[in-house]
Amino acid sequence: MLRTSLACTLKSWAAQLLPISPRHQEKHKAYRGRLLTMEFRTFPDQMIQVPCQIIRYAHKVIYRPAELDPI
């Protein structure tokens, strides 16, 4: 029960911290609404688990985010 509560809190905090610019206010509010009504199983897939390419190069590790489809 505690894990579910924390998961919902994380999802709602992520939605509330999204910036809303006056120029694209309608679009940003719609995105916030979709994030708030999203099921938590899809939340990590869309927001947390970002696909990326891992490159090892000259004692460095480089993470390149893959192209993402919008929600």
Image (spheres, rainbow, N blue to C red):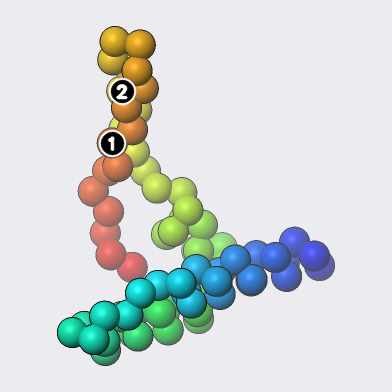
Q: Nearer the viewer, residue 37 or 18?
A: 18
Residue 44, image x and y in percent? Answer: 51, 57
Location of residue 47 with respect to 30 vertically, above or below: above
Which amino acid is tagged 2? Ile
Q: Quadrant of residue 28?
A: bottom left
Which label is found at residue 24?
none
Q: Is residue 27 left or right of residue 45?
A: left
Farthest residue, direction top? 58
Q: In terms of secondary structure, where does tag 2 sit?
A: strand
Farthest residue, direction left? 23
Location of residue 16 with respect to 68 vertically, above or below: below
On the image, numbered disc 2 is attached to which residue?
A: 55
Residue found at x 23% / y 48%: 67
Which amino acid is tagged 1? Arg
Q: Quadrant of the C terminus?
A: bottom left
* Between discs 2 and 1, the one toward the N terminus: 2
Residue found at x 27% / y 53%: 68
Q: Nearer the viewer, residue 10 or 40?
A: 10
Crowdedness near tag 2: few (<14), some (14–19) or many (≥20) residues, C-alpha within 10 Å: few
Residue 39 visible in image = no
Q: In terms of secondary structure, where does tag 1 sit?
A: strand
Location of residue 57 with respect to 52 vertically, above or below: above
Q: Is residue 35 left or right of residue 69?
A: right
Residue 25, image x and y in percent? Answer: 26, 87
Q: Quadrant of the N terminus?
A: bottom right
Residue 63, image x and y in percent? Answer: 33, 33
Q: Are marks 2 and 1 in contact (CB under 8 Å)?
A: yes
On the image, numbered disc 1 is attached to which residue?
A: 64
